[in-house]
Structure formats: C-alpha cells, structure tokens
Image (cartoon, grey):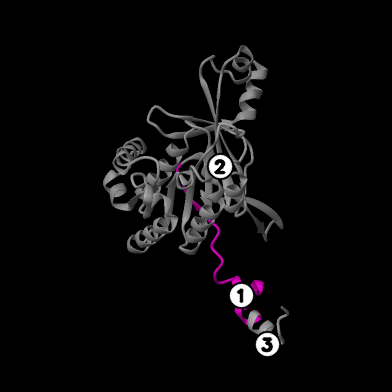
Amino acid sequence: MELSIKDMEDEAKKYGKFIKELGELKESAPEIFGVATGTKLDELFYYVEFDEKTQKFKKKILGGIPYRSVLNIVGIADTGKSVFAEQFAVYQAAHGYKVLFVTVESPAEFLYSSLKQKAYALNVDFDKVEENIIVVDASKSYQFRENVMSVIKTMEAAIKKKHCTVTVIDSVTGFYEHREVMARQIVRALFNFLKQHKQTALFVSQKRSSQQAESAEAAGGLAVAHIVDGTIILDKKLIETRFDQSLYGLPIGSVLRTIRIDGCRLSAHDSDTWVMEITDKGLIKIKEKLSDVIKKQKTK
C-alpha cells in the first residue's frame, strides 16, 4: 500500500530525531583521553595532534584505553583475560573511581578473594578497593543470567546509585554460552546500555576450540567484535620443539604469552604483538615486542 503525502510527512517527523548536522554533535562528543589500566597497554593507545609551532603532527600517548570505549578482551583458556580485567578494576578502584564488576563465571565470594590478592600485589589500599568496586553476581542464577534485560536493569540501578564510571563484565560469553545465535542481540543491548550511561568498559570473551587463537573471533562469532569499539587479543604458545626454543629463547615446556590490540575505532594504537607474562604475584606485565625478542635471538 502506497503512503499518502501526510503519512510520509508523519514518518519524516518520527525519524527526524535520528538526523543531525555534524556541528550539533559538538557538545555531546566525549573527550579524548585514556583510562589507565596500570600496564604498558596505556602507552600503546595514542592520538595525533597538530603542533602550531613546528607545523608538524605529533603522536601523543593516550595514557590508557580510550575514555568511554567498550573493548572486548578475547583469548583461549588460561591466557590472562580475567587477570587483566581484575587488575584493571582494582587499579581504577584504588585511584578513586567507582567500578561495576559483573561476574558471570566466578561466584562473587571467589571474586572477592581474587581482587584482594590483586590489591596486595599492586600494593594499593584494599579498603579503598572494597569501597569502590560494586559487584553484580550473575554466576549463581540461571534465570537471572539468561534474562539480559534483568541484568541490564540491575546494572543500571548500581551505576546510578553508586555513580560508577567503569564497568567490567567477566565474561559476556556467559550470557549466551549455549545460544550463540543470540550473541549479537545480547552484546548490542549491553553495548548500547554502556554507551548511554557513559561507561568505560571491558568485556571478557571466551574462544571456542575451533577458532583461530590470533583472531578477534570469539564465541558468538565476529559479530561481537564488530559491535564493540575494539578488541584486545591474548594468546599463548607452548614451547614444544628445538626450533621454538631457538626462535623465542625459551626452554621447551615453557609458555610464551602475547597481547595485541587487534583494532580500535576510537583511537590510534600500536598494532604489534607484545610479549607479556603473568607474574608470580598474579599480575599482567607487558614486556617487549615479539619481533624484538626474535631479532635478539637471531643475533646470538
């Protein structure tokens, strides 16, 4: 059925709110700065600024992950995804920022113990961390975890009541672990909610065994990576052969861990693969570029 002129005018008015001139967005555009993780990752995001004196462009370190970004932390099992997410949460809380931590895998009491250890390892005031981290436990109730709108309403109440500015979800995969066909819908709802409430957020995502370890793909497919603002990939390689030993300078049987920013639409970033380790204290430490490690070995 064809629309009348009046119907078309009504439709135009209805959807006109979605149309903006670029200049109208100036006041609502977020600032460009970094939200610190307390790791070398803070040096790997940057922006380019024009210097009026030298008439040249200069690269300036952002100092953290981009403000109000929603990033996906992806990796196979035991690559340090939760370690990174917890370290980020503790670091932010210790510096006075309110953090909402949605735990989907580990019950809240176990999360408490883990965050306490992270605080001691970082040598920060745990009393301050206790005060500034607000936990939503979605691990124990199947019905709660399966109803993403109930989770979002609970998160909204916590953010408004406690004035949270940072959110961590570990893991977002837990919301669709046996119904991956809904992954895009669920992640989009969470993403839009976090954007609306001006959160800087991390999603932890699990990989399936059939997915390439070095790719941004995780459970739910590449659709998840396309929705979020960027992806950080954690990986590990077991040193199994003499060739591996010679290439990386590590003994057979040891593990080489790496981290790489796969992409970010809010900020420029280093795209190299970096060697990292999980220290004896249970902290993420990013050390040097993998290419530099290999070069050093070649010169020996």
Q: Which residue is mark 2?
A: 232
Q: In the image, residue 27 lies at what x, y percent? A: 55, 72
Total numbered badges shown on the rendered structure: 3
Q: Is residue 158 left or right of residue 81?
A: left
Helix, strand or loop at label 1? It is helix
The picture quadrant where one finds residue 88 is top left
Q: Mark 3 or mark 1, which has the lower sequence index?
A: 3
For the residues carrying marks 3 and 1, which lies nearer the camera in this image? 3
Task: Reply above or below: 134 against 291.
Answer: below
**Looking at the image, which residue is at 40% across and 41% down?**
105
Pointers 3 and 1 in contact (C-beta within 8 Å): no
Is residue 62 at least partly visible in the picture?
no
Q: Hey, what amino acid is under mark 2?
A: Ile
Q: Hey, what amino acid is under mark 1?
A: Glu
Q: In the image, residue 272 lies at what x, y percent? A: 63, 37
- Circle on res. 6: 3
Q: Which residue is mark 1?
A: 24
Query: Dot 2: within a 10 Å radius of its alpha carbon, few (fewer than 14), some, or many (20 or more) residues?
Result: many
User: In the image, which residues are magenta?
Assistant: 12-38
The alpha-carbon separation of the residues under discs 3 and 2 comes to 50 Å
Q: Nearer the viewer, residue 85 or 144?
A: 144
Q: Mark 3 or mark 2, which has the lower sequence index?
A: 3
Residue at the outermost top position: 242
Is residue 122 at least partly visible in the picture?
yes
**Looking at the image, which residue is at 54% across and 55% down?**
185
- Circle on res. 10: none
